[in-house]
Image (spheres, rainbow, N blue to C red):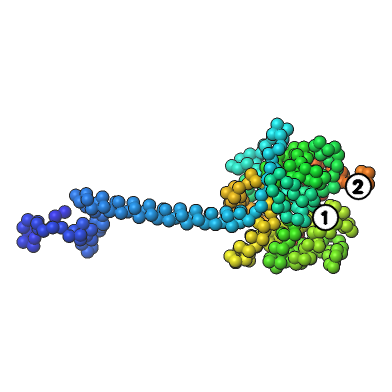
Amino acid sequence: MSERQPDGGAPSERNPSPDDDRRLPPAGEPAQDGDDLPQADDAPNRRHWLRRTLISLGVLGLVLAVVIGAGAWFFTNRYGGNIDRVGDVFQALDEETRPAAPSPTGEAAQATEDPITFLLVGSDTRAEVAPGELPDARSDAIMLARFSGDREHAQVVSIPRDSWVDIPGHGKNKINAAYALGGPTLLIQTIEQLTGVRIDHYAAIDFDGLIQVTDDLGGVDVVVSETTSNGPYTFTAGLNHLDGDQARWYVGQRYDLPGGDFDRVKRQQNYLRAMFGKLFSQEVFTSPGKLDSTLLAVTSAVAVDDELGNGDLLSMAYSLRGLTPSDVEFFTAPVLGTGMEGPASVVYLDPTTGARMWGYLQTDSLGQNADEFADEALPEVPR
């Protein structure tokens, strides 16, 4: 559109000003397409405008990428890097004799992710070992933890440490003897042979280190079935609020429990559920400083197999971001009873009921069939 002289003469021959290229429409006249853009007949200006815009977007994208990448690096190395690694856990296993990967059925088959199974071993000493060396020979807690394919549910199955089982190459013995004889590799072989469930990863938990977190969280609440005493403390039947030192004696009690080793398993599960329930509380997550110190304490009490890199841990944690403690169910491997093998008191597992439980784990459907195992499940904590 050309500009005319007041007397209706020809357009002005003057050089156009910047305002000619980006002028506003007259008052009351609607804006037309291109009114605020370089004019079509001004190619150099248009190219300049486009180049400047693209450069700005590129710089913005680069800044965002750097910020996001730096944040991911910070969290990955600050927390993932605080977790120790246990070397050569799976390398010596014979793949041809190991169980097949899970085969989800029903609703579980619709999940976009594969289930993940961890072997969790709890001990009194943190597992800081070099590749090829054995960790502490004690395994006070043995648990299979399954994260479902939908990443919205998890099941933890405790196997009593005195369970009388076949240990590959060593005959019959208590299951925790596998850990003493061959470390996590032999324990994985033993449990895979027992259950037919493939184990993907290994994690060692130092209960002493984990219990230090209890005081940071202001204590935890657990339910005791019958009044017992251990060390300087008495745990009364019902709800008990435990500080860190009390929790150490509570989890560490080995004798004088009404249900023997079964009650000890329930105490381990009770504590883990209470501790992680408190960890995921709103109070912790609204205090960045408290959350940071707590996560550092938790991660310092854990060691995992060396096939889990920091990036893998971050990716796994992100996929489980919607999982809450209320989505985790606790079970104990089905048992027939206790007895003696020579001078040793042992636990006899129930092969029939156990086969059903392991089969549900194999098809990622234990959560949907939990009612079948009411006797083996940890009761809900009353509130």
Label 1: few (<14), some (14–19) or many (≥20) C-alpha neighbours in 10 Å: many
Label 2: few (<14), some (14–19) or many (≥20) C-alpha neighbours in 10 Å: few
Locate residue 189 relative to residue 54 in the image: left or right. Answer: right
Kindly tell me whether residue 156 is visible in this rendering. no
Label 2 sits on residue: 344
Q: In 3D space, how far apart are the residues under numbered discs 2 and 1 (Cα atoms)?
A: 18 Å
User: Given the image, on which type of amino acid does mark 2 rest?
Assistant: Ala
Q: Secondary structure at mark 2?
A: strand
Locate residue 3 relative to residue 312 in the image: left or right. Answer: left
Residue in the picture at 73% in, 33% down: 97
Where residue 348 appears, x then y in whole percent? 87, 43
* Residue 26 higher or lower than 147, as above or below: below
Q: Secondary structure at mark 1?
A: helix
Image mark count:
2
Q: Quadrant of residue 252?
A: bottom right
Residue in the picture at 34% in, 51% down: 54
Q: Which mark is residue 264?
A: 1
Where residue 173 appears, x then y in whole percent? 86, 42
Q: Earlier in the sequence, mark 2 or mark 1?
A: 1
Where residue 58 appears, x then y in whole percent? 38, 52
Of circles 2 and 1, which is in front? 2
Which of the pair 73/282 is nearer the observer? 73
Q: Which mark is residue 87?
A: none
Q: Quadrant of residue 83?
A: bottom right
Which of the pair 77/373 is nearer the observer? 77
Where residue 233 appears, x then y in whole percent? 84, 67
Residue in the picture at 83% in, 38% down: 170
Please identify the residue farthest to the top as the structure is shown: 96
Q: Quadrant of the C terminus?
A: bottom right
